[in-house]
Image (cartoon, helix red, strand yellow):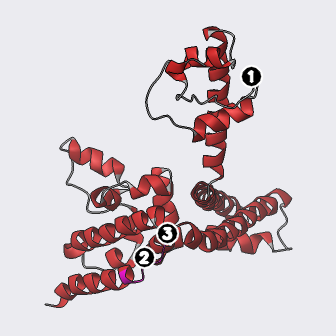
Amino acid sequence: MTDEHQDAAGWFEGLDPGDTAGAATAIREGSADAPDDWPAIAVESGFADDDDEYYEALHEATLRATREAVHEAERADDKQLIHAIRAMDDCERVANELAERVAEWAGSRRGDAGTGVAYARTLADDETVDDRRLASLAGRVRDLDDEAAALRSHVERTAPEVAPNLTALAGAVLAARLIALVGGLKQLARKPAGTVQVLGAEEALFAHLRGRAPSPKHGIIFTHEAVRGTHPEHRGSAARALAGKLSIAARIDHYAGDRRPELEAELHDRIERIQARDVE
């Protein structure tokens, strides 16, 4: 290496030509203090015979580095939580849709036909059902309902590990749904409180922006008792207070990871003051 580049180090420093795995690791973890003529340095150091060979090695290494980064991201705990909550919601949705079909079908054959997943479960275990296909379909509803329950238990176990403060404030299922809506805990931590407040109400928000509807007061956080249990006149205030604390909790979970019980106490006090307006 020439004196001009003797202090420079490219991502290929210390690598043997053809070591794509090592090159991918170097690209993901390495850095340089300043730009330099890396192709020339690579040739001078013997890593590549010419510029074309350098760029070919760089291309292969960056592709591998990208694949590894994507694989790691998909295996991250928050991504696994997203898969679980989405699967749970899918199982519940399909179970309810099939339960409607079971009820309609059973209504054409039985005078005591009921409705809903609970009726489908009863029918699946009823040995007096004389239609094998109807009983089988009811059994599918039962199995999907069981799978949804198992997934819910999984979400409730893993959400506190992924986002302890967010889960403490929102509950496991709502915390998981908030993370899923934005694609990850990191993405949620970067959202302002105003965005967290209306997550899940995108259609209403777009209608408002087009001048066709009032601004939505809340999205899926409506399922939280702090919002749902507040008088409609004050739900906007409750939703803002909750979203503010959820936003802070997500940031703590992502950037620090330690539990902050005071967030719960602060939220409780704030919601209590807002709900007290109902009786004034």
Residue shown at 59% from the left, 60% from the top: 85
Q: Is residue 29 left or right of residue 179?
A: right
Instruction: Give how far apart the Cα atoms at labels 3 and 2 are.
Output: 15 Å
Numbered range of the magenta stretch: 258-262
In 3D space, how far apart are the residues under numbered discs 1 and 2 (Cα atoms)?
A: 53 Å
Q: Name the front one of labels 1 and 2.
A: 1
In the image shown, does 225 or 56 lie closer to the viewer? Answer: 56
Q: Is residue 258 above or below residue 39?
A: below
First in sequence, mark 1 or 3: give its number: 1
Describe the element under mark 3 as helix, strand or loop: loop
Classified by dominant secondary structure, the portion drawn in magenta counts as loop
Q: 10 Å neighbourhood of mark 2: few (<14), some, or many (≥20)?
A: many
1 or 3: mark nearer the eye: 1
x%, y% of residue 202?
35, 49
Closer to the chain start, of discs 1 and 2, is: 1
Could you tell me residue 215's position as x and y percent?
A: 21, 55
Task: Judge depth for marks 3 and 2 and give the one in front.
Answer: 3
Q: CA distance from mark 1 to mark 3?
A: 41 Å
Residue at which label 1 appears: 17
Q: Is residue 52 left or right of residue 241?
A: right
Q: Which mark is residue 169?
A: 2
* Whether residue 28 is visible: yes
Dot 2: element = helix
Name the amino acid, label 1: Pro
Name which residue lies at 59% across and 30% down: 11
User: In the image, what residue occupies the spot 21% across and 82% down?
Assistant: 274
Say which element carries label 1: loop
Residue under numbered circle 3: 257
